[in-house]
Amino acid sequence: MKKYGFHLNDAYTSERYGGNIQAHFSLNKNLKPSKNVQLILDEEKKKYQNDLSVYKTFKNNISKNKNQLYEFLNKNKNKNIVGKSFPARASILIHHYDYLKDFINIVGEQNTSKKINHYIAGTNIKIVDSKLFKKDKPDLMIIFAWHMFEKIRDKWMKIGLNKTKYIKPLPKLKIF
């Protein structure tokens, strides 16, 4: 942010999405950072920042997960595989797990989504109204809003997709 002339002036943590840090920046260089900024920096430093093993473990877990999902999808490549839900985090996953664009060609969103009839940037994966799944009954559904996995899976099972296998890609690969 410094590169563009922004200055950190506030930050706070939240349990949303499994925990995150939200930072607030300003072009006003005269604003002093709130006490929250230093508290969060101190906490991060104490927990993680000086421990390279935390990042190596994270990298290894992601690599392992990426390989496991690839192996599973490759074994099932002749099945109807779809994605469900497209929060911003899904874009990162789809681009890091770059093979996903070879297995899925649609991601379903609720009918009120403004993403419908658009494509995921850098792919040929189209975002569609997920009511299409009622008719097409996919064999496998990767739920990209993994923080809401149970709620989404349960909804689609109640709708009648009882034979569909549901895939929770993160934080640890699970297939139901």
Image (spheres, grey):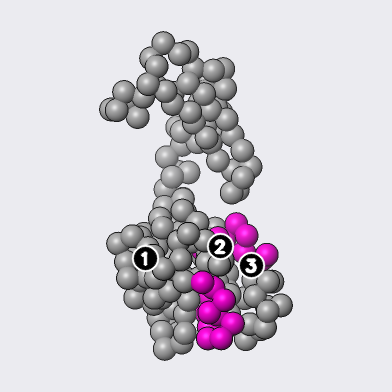
Instruction: Determine the image quadrant of residue 94.
Output: bottom left
Distance between the Cα atoms at labels 2 and 3? 16 Å
Residue for badge 2: 112
- Under mark 1, the amino acid is Tyr
Task: Work out whether residue 120 can be spotted.
Answer: yes
Q: Residue at image x 46%, y 87%? A: 79
Q: Is residue 136 magenta?
A: yes
Task: Work out whether residue 142 can be spotted.
Answer: no
Whole-percent x and y of residue 98? 34, 65
Whole-percent x and y of residue 53? 45, 43
| Secondary element type, mark 1 | loop
Screen quadrant of the C terminus: bottom right
| Image position of 3 (left or right of 175) | left
Q: Is residue 118 magenta?
A: no
Q: Residue at image x 38%, y 14%? A: 29
Screen quadrant of the N terminus: top left
Whole-percent x and y of residue 44? 52, 31
Residue for badge 3: 152
Residue for badge 1: 119
- Is residue 101 placed above or below 14 in the rendered structure? below
Q: Which circle, 1 or 3, is nearer the viewer?
A: 1
Label located before the other in sequence (1 or 2): 2
- Under mark 2, the amino acid is Thr
- Is residue 121 placed above or below 31 in the rendered structure? below
| Secondary element type, mark 3 | helix
Label located before the other in sequence (1 or 3): 1
Q: Residues within 10 Å of mark 1 (few under 14, many from 20)?
A: some
Q: Nearer the viewer, residue 77 or 173?
A: 77
Q: Write down the region rendered in magenta.
A: 129-151
Q: Residue at image x 34%, y 75%? A: 102
